[in-house]
C-alpha cells in the first residue's frame, strides 16, 4: 500500500517524482496532503495537473489550485478559472476571481462582472479587486455602482479599483465615498483620489484631514501629495502636528515630494522627526525644545516619542530633563521610549537624573538597563564616578 504523509510528499518532491505526487493528489484521503502535493507539483513545474485539481472533491484543494494558477499567470488557466467562478463553495469562487485578476486578461472581465451578483460579499470584493488589476475601462460604471454595496469591504475594494483604472470621471463617485460611514471605505476612497490626481478633489481631501480616523488622515495626506496643487501646502504643514506618527510621516513625505522647504521652527522640527532625520531636527536648535517635549509627552507613536527623546538629548537643553525622567520612570511607556529617554539623560548630564537612572538599572528590559548604565557612565565621566556611584 502506498502510504501518504508529510514526509512522503517532501521526499517525493526532493526526488522530482511527479508520478508519485500525482498519486497523492489523486488518492490521498486528507485534503491537506493533497494541497501539499499540489504545491509540490507547482514548484516542480508540473502545471497541467493543476487544471485537474480544480475539480477536486475538497473545496480547499480547488481553492488552492485556483490561487496557484493565478500566481503563475498562465493564460491557459483562464477558462477553467471562469468555470470555477460558479463553484458552489464561496472560497473557491473568491480564489478564482483573485486568480483571474492576477492573470490580468481583459477577456475575463465579462464573467467577473457577472459575479457582482454573488450573494457572498467576500466574492464580490475579490471581483472588484480583480477588475482593478485587469484595468479595463468597461468596468468603471459597474465598479462605481458597487460603491453603494451593503458591505464595507466591497465598497472599499471598488474604490481602490476605480483608482487603479485611472479615469477622472470616477472622481465624483469617489468624493461621495469620502463621506462613507465606514473608515476603511473613506481611506480607500482617499487613496483612489490620490491616484486620479484631480484638482477638484483638493478641497474635499483637505476637509478629510480632520477625519476622526488616523488611517483616513494618513491616506488623505498621501493623496494630497500626489495631486500637488498649491492649496495643499498649508493643510499638510498643519498636519505635521497630528498626534499620530503615521499621519505626520505621510504629511512629511508629501511635503518632501512637493519640494517644501522647512523653516527653523516647530513645523520644521516635526517635519524632520517624521522623516526620522534626527540630525536635521537637532540643527534647528533650542527653539524646537518645547515642541519636541510635546511630542515626547503626548504623541501616540512610540517611534515618534523615542525620536523626540534622542533629539532632546542631542540638543542638551535642561528643560527636557523633567519630561525625560517622567518617561524613563513610566512603567507603561514602551521600552524603546524609556531606553531613548535614558540615553538622552546621559547626554544632558543633569545630576537630577542620577536616582531615576539607578532605578532603571533594575528595569525588566535589557535595553533600558543597558541605556541607563551607559548614561550613568557618561555622567560619571564628567562628575567623577565616586559621586555618581558607578
Image: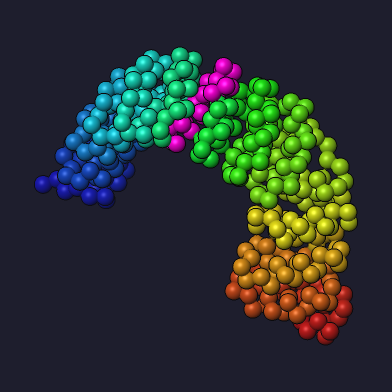
Give the image quarter of residue 287.
Answer: bottom right
> In this rendering, would 280 be left or right of 361?
right
Judge whether 262 appears above or below 78 on screen: below
Q: Position of residue 58 (x, y in %)?
A: 21, 38
Judge whether 281 appears above or below 132 on screen: below
- The colour scheme used to paint the residues is rainbow
Q: Position of residue 16 (x, y in %)?
A: 29, 38
The C terminus appears in which quarter of the rendering? Answer: bottom right
Q: Please name the predominant secondary structure of the magenta segment in the image.
A: helix
Q: Is 177 colored magenta in this rendering?
A: no
Closer to us: 41 or 301: 301
The structure residue drawn at horizontal position 76% and vertical position 42%, both measured from the top left corner, is 238
Q: Position of residue 278 (x, y in %)?
A: 77, 51
* Residue 170 visible here: yes
How many callouts does the rendering have? 0
Q: Is 170 colored magenta in this rendering?
A: yes
Give the image quarter of residue 122.
Answer: top left
The structure residue drawn at horizontal position 73% and vertical position 76%, both measured from the top left corner, is 357
Closer to us: 73 or 301: 301
Stretch in magenta: 152-173
Give the image quarter of residue 325.
Answer: bottom right
> In this rendering, would 250 be left or right of 233?
left
Closer to us: 289 or 83: 289
> In this rendering, would 37 be left or right of 223?
left
The structure residue drawn at horizontal position 69% and vertical position 44%, both measured from the top left corner, is 249
Amino acid at each position: 500500500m502506498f502510504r501518504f504523509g508529510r514526509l512522503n510528499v517532501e521526499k517525493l518532491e526532493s526526488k522530482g517524482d511527479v508520478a508519485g505526487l500525482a498519486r497523492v493528489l489523486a488518492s490521498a484521503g486528507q485534503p491537506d496532503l493533497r494541497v501539499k502535493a499540489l504545491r509540490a507539483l507547482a514548484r516542480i513545474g508540473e502545471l497541467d495537473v493543476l487544471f485537474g485539481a480544480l475539480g477536486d472533491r475538497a473545496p480547499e484543494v480547488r481553492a488552492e489550485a485556483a490561487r496557484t494558477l493565478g500566481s503563475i499567470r498562465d493564460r491557459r488557466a483562464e477558462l477553467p478559472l471562469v468555470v470555477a467562478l460558479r463553484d458552489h463553495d464561496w472560497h473557491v469562487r473568491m480564489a478564482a476571481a483573485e486568480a483571474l485578476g492576477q492573470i490580468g486578461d481583459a477577456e475575463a472581465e465579462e464573467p467577473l462582472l457577472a459575479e457582482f451578483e454573488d450573494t457572498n460579499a467576500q466574492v464580490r470584493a475579490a471581483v472588484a479587486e480583480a477588475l482593478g488589476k485587469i484595468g479595463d475601462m468597461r468596468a468603471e460604471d459597474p465598479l462605481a455602482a458597487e460603491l453603494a454595496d451593503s458591505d464595507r469591504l466591497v465598497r472599499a475594494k471598488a474604490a481602490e479599483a476605480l483608482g487603479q483604472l485611472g479615469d477622472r470621471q470616477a472622481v465624483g463617485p469617489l468624493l461621495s465615498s469620502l463621506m462613507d460611514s465606514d473608515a476603511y471605505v473613506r481611506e480607500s476612497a482617499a487613496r483612489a483620489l490620490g491616484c486620479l490626481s484631480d484638482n477638484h478633489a483638493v478641497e474635499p481631501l483637505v476637509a478629510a484631514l480632520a477625519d476622526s480616523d488616523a488611517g483616513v488622515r494618513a491616506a488623505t495626506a498621501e493623496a494630497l501629495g500626489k495631486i500637488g496643487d498649491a492649496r495643499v501646502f498649508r493643510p499638510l504643514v498643519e498636519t505635521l502636528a497630528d498626534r499620530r506618527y503615521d499621519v505626520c510621516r505621510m504629511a512629511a513625505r508629501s511635503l518632501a515630494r512637493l519640494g517644501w522647504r522647512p523653516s527653523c521652527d516647530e513645523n520644521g522640527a516635526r517635519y524632520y522627526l517624521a522623516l526620522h532625520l534626527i540630525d536635521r531636527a537637532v540643527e534647528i536648535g533650542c527653539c524646537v525644545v518645547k515642541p519636541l517635549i510635546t511630542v515626547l509627552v503626548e504623541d501616540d507613536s512610540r517611534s515618534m516619542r523615542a525620536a523626540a527623546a534622542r533629539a532632546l538629548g542631542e540638543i542638551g537643553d535642561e528643560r527636557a530633563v523633567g519630561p525625560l525622567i517622567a518617561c524613563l520612570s513610566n512603567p507603561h511607556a514602551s521600552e524603546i521610549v524609556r531606553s531613548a529617554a535614558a540615553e538622552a539623560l546621559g547626554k544632558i548630564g543633569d545630576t537630577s537624573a542620577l536616582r531615576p537612572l539607578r532605578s532603571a538599572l533594575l528595569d525588566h528590559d535589557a535595553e533600558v538597563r543597558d541605556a541607563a548604565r551607559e548614561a550613568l557612565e557618561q555622567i560619571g565621566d564628567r562628575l567623577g564616578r565616586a559621586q555618581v556611584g558607578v
